[in-house]
Image (cartoon, coloured by chain):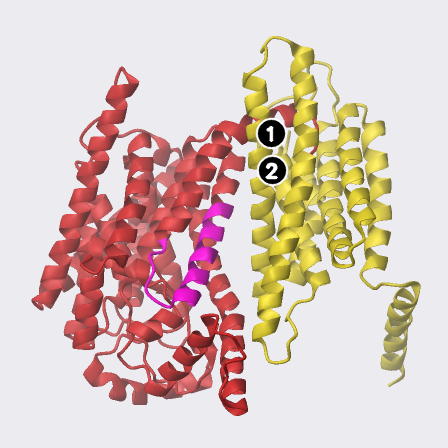
Amino acid sequence: MAENLANVLHEQLSEGFPDTHRNNSGEGADRRRVVEGADQELNGQPPSARPSQRLESEEDEDEELTLKYGAKHVIMLFVPVTLCMVVVVATIKSVSFYTQKDGQLIYTPFPEDTETVGQRALNSILNAAIMISVIIVMTLLLVVLYKYRCYKVIHGWLIISSLLLLFFFSFIYLGEVFKTYNVGMDYITLALIIWNFGVVGMICIHWKGPLHLQQAYLIMISALMALVFIKYLPEWTAWLILAVISVYDLVAVLCPKGPLRMLVETAQERNEPIFPALIYSSTMVWLVNMADTDAESRKKPPLNSTMPESQAAPSQSAQGPDDGGFTSDWELRQQETLGHMESSEETRRQVQEMPSARPPAIQSDDSEERGVKLGLGDFIFYSVLVGKASATASGDWNTTLACFVAILIGLCLTLLLLAIFKKALPALPISITFGLVFYFATDNLVRPFMDQLALHQFYI
Amino acid sequence: MTIAVFFGCSFIAFGPAFALFIFTIARDPLRVIILIAGAFFWLLSLLLSSLVWFIAMKASNDKDQQLQRGLLIFGVMFSVLLQEVFRFAYYKLLRKASDGLAALSEDERSHISVQQMAYVAGLGFGIMSGAFSMINILADSLGPGIVGIHGESQYFFLTSAFMTMAVTLLHTFWGVVFFDGCENRRWWVIAVVVALHLLVSGLTFLNPIYEGSLPPAYVILVSMAVWAFFSCGGSLQNIQQFLTCWKNDAGSEVAS
């Protein structure tokens, strides 16, 4: 399930534009028409084919706005992705716990410290296969649960997942940081800190909270998940899983019978928001039940109108079943985290890919409102790639930097494609492909070159 | 190798670039994207040139030091040429994108001028080049060790930092001048930029005789700065106006 959600979430990368497309929930029809109109033009239709001057200028304006805000959306995603990666790399470089080999997940049972290279390759392929099948199974399970409206189950799963992540994993993380810096702390203070952190996190993520706080929490949990993956996945398995997940993402999102696509379509049929909580959103997202849209809008506008650009209330308003769907997905993810790490991520990813209902509460055509959404799974896998690069590459910082730039450019290209094609696109394939290519190329080709240059102090 | 060395060298190497980024680029999303794409293009050129060097190195005799040094020099020259080729490719890409943007916008003008794009692209190249040269050295400077214990220069970190700063700013100015040359079809400008880049890289072969590499690099830096300033529309009058306006504003403030 999670995987499906994650995949959907990948698609969810459709912030402004696809959002409006798949967001049939509260978007004003006008706004969608306007956006679609702008998008149409953006599709490269010759400007000469304009019917009337006024329509032209409107469309031009929309297009220009679209392009202008296209760049803005890209930056709105660059910043959180960069932050997540910085947190992961900083942790990997300073806290040695996450680079120690303390066993593997049960989802990757085959060890990688074998005698022959062939055996190691075989083991890693088997590990990746098992992981991917787990992810696929979870995704299908999620789709089935969602289809048969078992919202309570999904909801429960998500809550347990977030509890685990926010309390247990952050406790471990804090413990390891204290160990690294030799800070003594008593259990009472620690309990207070973890309790507050966790409870505020649950509230922000699943209910309402200040937007920046919610974003910060989402980044933190993505980083925590990525660190867990980096720790427990052996090397070759990790790279293989990254590659296979990109392919799976591509397939699941673009194929007509893909689980994510089915999930999205089901959600659209029912006119419900899908798992908004597992998506990082740069503007406030209203998790509003379709039926309650108007009520919500009426309640919220005062906040919105006073702070048009800033984010008043964030999203997650658990409104019964819809919210359940969302949180349960997250839960699913968490569950998977416990046992099935990849699954959880997948779930998250997929959930994130789900289009979330964008409320039309703010009736302005201000593009500021058109925020950008990216699934948490995308954050997690980007961070896994960069973190693994910084953990295992002998070229150290050059490799990390190269992977970082490659992922950002991949994200940029994905958003560009999104703006051109205006349909749900997976966020992983391009970035992960670039990241992998640059990792291996930099580690094997550029590193020796730069080392020799640095040795002789030659500058290119 | 202390924290002081680390911070000092990182600020020397990246201070100007960072300041340029904060004050001129960070606010505009389009410029940030152009910057990162510029960094990406530089990275691509480095990748290809290191591939060529790697193949050449593997195909040759490992033990022959002179040959390896010669191959390295060849690698550096090839890399410089490839960087300029990719700079040209990036110019073409930006031109196309800019034309597209202009065609789509209302008043047929692009939001960002070619000179601005040239500056941002050059800075992207420079930041990436500087980062790749310097980051590993900075990371090492935090750890234990003694600089030049085997008789090499004690000033390794400092000279690296200064050279990195020079190269970063040089890339910025070269970007401006290069794009201007491409815009106005002045091919001799491009040839001069390539030649200067080769010269600066070639001078670093004299390291660790830093007198041979650093001062000339800085002389070239200053002259490139002047050239870039004049090529994108600056003039002595502009400077004068800038200075006198500032003085005038201050004066009027005092008066009122």
Say which amino acid is labelled 2: Phe
| Residue A318 versus residue A91 in the image, above or below | below
Q: Quadrant of residue A305?
A: bottom left
Q: Is residue A406 magenta?
A: yes
Helix, strand or loop at mark 1: helix
* Chain represented in yellow: B
Q: What x and y, as percent, mark residue B189?
A: 81, 49
Q: Chain A rendered in what hue?
A: red
Judged left or right of residue A216, residue A119 is left
Residue at image point 35% right, 45% down:
A174
Residue topped by disc 2: B132
Was residue A367 drawn as part of the magenta stretch in this picture? no
* A16 is higher (above) or lower (below) than A347: below
The residue lying at 34 percent from left, 85 percent from top is A361
Residue A450, labelled with which disc? Answer: 1
Residue A225 disc label: none
- Please tell me whether residue A362 is drawn above or below residue A401 in the rendered image: below
* Chain holding disc 1: A
Q: Which residues are magenta?
A: A405-427
Image x and y of residue A246, in percent: 32, 47
The answer to whether the residue labelled 2 contacts the one labelled 1, judged by CB atoms less than 8 Å apart, is yes
| Label 2 – label 1 distance at C-alpha | 8 Å
